[in-house]
Image: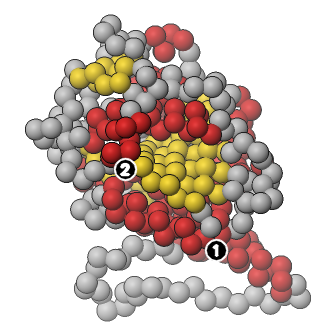
Amino acid sequence: MYILIYIIFLKKYTFTKYKTIFKKNENIKEKINFSITSSNKNFFIKIKKDIENIINGVFLTRDLVSEPPNYLNPEKFVTEIKKLSKLGLKVDIFDYSKMKKMGMNALLGVAQGSKNLPYFVTITWKPNNSKNKKPLSFIGKGVCFDTGGISLKPAKFMEDMKYDMAGAGAVVGLMKTLALRKSKSYVVGAVALVENMPGGSAQRPGDIVKSYSGKTIEVLNTDAEGRLILADAIYYIDEQYKPELIVDLATLTGAIVVSLGNEYAGLFSNNDELSEKLIKAGEIENEKLWRFPLHKNYDNLMDSKIADIQNINYSGGAGSITAAQFLQRFLKNNTPWAHLDIAGMAWTKKDLDTVPTGATGYGVKLLNKFVEKYYE
């Protein structure tokens, strides 16, 4: 019964905010009405409430990912995040000047071609009865639109790049669900929000930037931008919070779609126990993960001849793995870490069992179950 109600709610999602003309029988806000006869009324009330808490987070993520890029720029994204404060979440916003002073130059370099300024936001849920002293941390890539920058993408399907912020969307949706259901875990979410645009001030292939960690990065391809903003975000969270674990989500590589299609997200991790927990949580929620290897030989492919690290494997191949190796270099404390490459899972071009065509909200259910099952 629980699963049936869950599926019904998930499948009924629509995004019609910008429709002004409807077919005769089209309903903007379709309601689901059903009745259940049972002697245990309170049990079903709790089930309904539990489902609504998760659905609210998933639907927030789907809404954010569905928004057109002329609306959901980094500043508007921050406006949406601020609304979560009323649920008891602490929202801290880092604007351009603050990030510049801190030295988040990898993130700022990606954003410098856009007139829309970047932001870095942390979202904290810390209940009085928290089960963990050190926070669980979840970090999302939030490229609100990705042209590829100077390394320009092909025009065909570039409109899909509005969903390059789906990792950040999933983190925001997760934090909403955790707050709504009054999670007993101390959790910190973080999102790095930018636009990657070409222009006279845009970052160039061949530029070198000094990241927040102090490591220098040779930018060989400006379309490998997600790893640059995550580099600063990961190091900051690891340094400032010393978390129990870090999980980042990102629509990071096209290579993961070639590998896994639209059935699994890629999982990369330095910790077997963390990987197993994530995989099991994904199986329960049908948000599947497939683990890929990390190895020093892949890591060596990211060495630059003139800087500490380069942002692509210039020799080609293993694109998703070498991207993860890049991110791993920005852990400060050898914290248990997992990178989820969700490029093939954030959007669907066909109706699925629980997802209509469009934004999937992938990651919210998976990570909510991960927190609930193992840390509460």
Q: Residue at x 22, y 20 (%)?
A: 206
Q: Which mark is residue 95?
A: 2
Note whether 20 is above or below 202 in the view shown. below
Q: Which mark is residue 52?
A: 1
Where does the image place residue 52, in percent across and percent down from the top left? 64, 74
**Label 2: how many Cα within 10 Å (few below 14, some 14–19, many 20+):** some
Residue farthest toward the left in the current orientation of the protein:
200
186 left or right of 215 in image: right
**Which amino acid type corresponds to the residue marked 1 in the rendered image?**
Glu
| Mark 2 vs 1, N-terminal side | 1
Mark 2 element type: loop
**Is any atom of residue 270 visible in this view?**
no
1 left or right of 162 in image: right
Mark 1 element type: helix
Where does the image place residue 159, in percent across and percent down from the top left? 24, 54
Question: How is the rendered protein coloured?
Answer: secondary structure
* Residue 221: quadrant of the picture: top left
184 left or right of 172 in image: right
Q: Residue at x 34, y 33 (%)?
A: 105
Residue farthest toward the right in the current orientation of the protein:
39
Q: Which mark is residue 367?
A: none
Note whether 182 is above or below 164 in the view shown. below
Front position among marks 2 and 1: 2
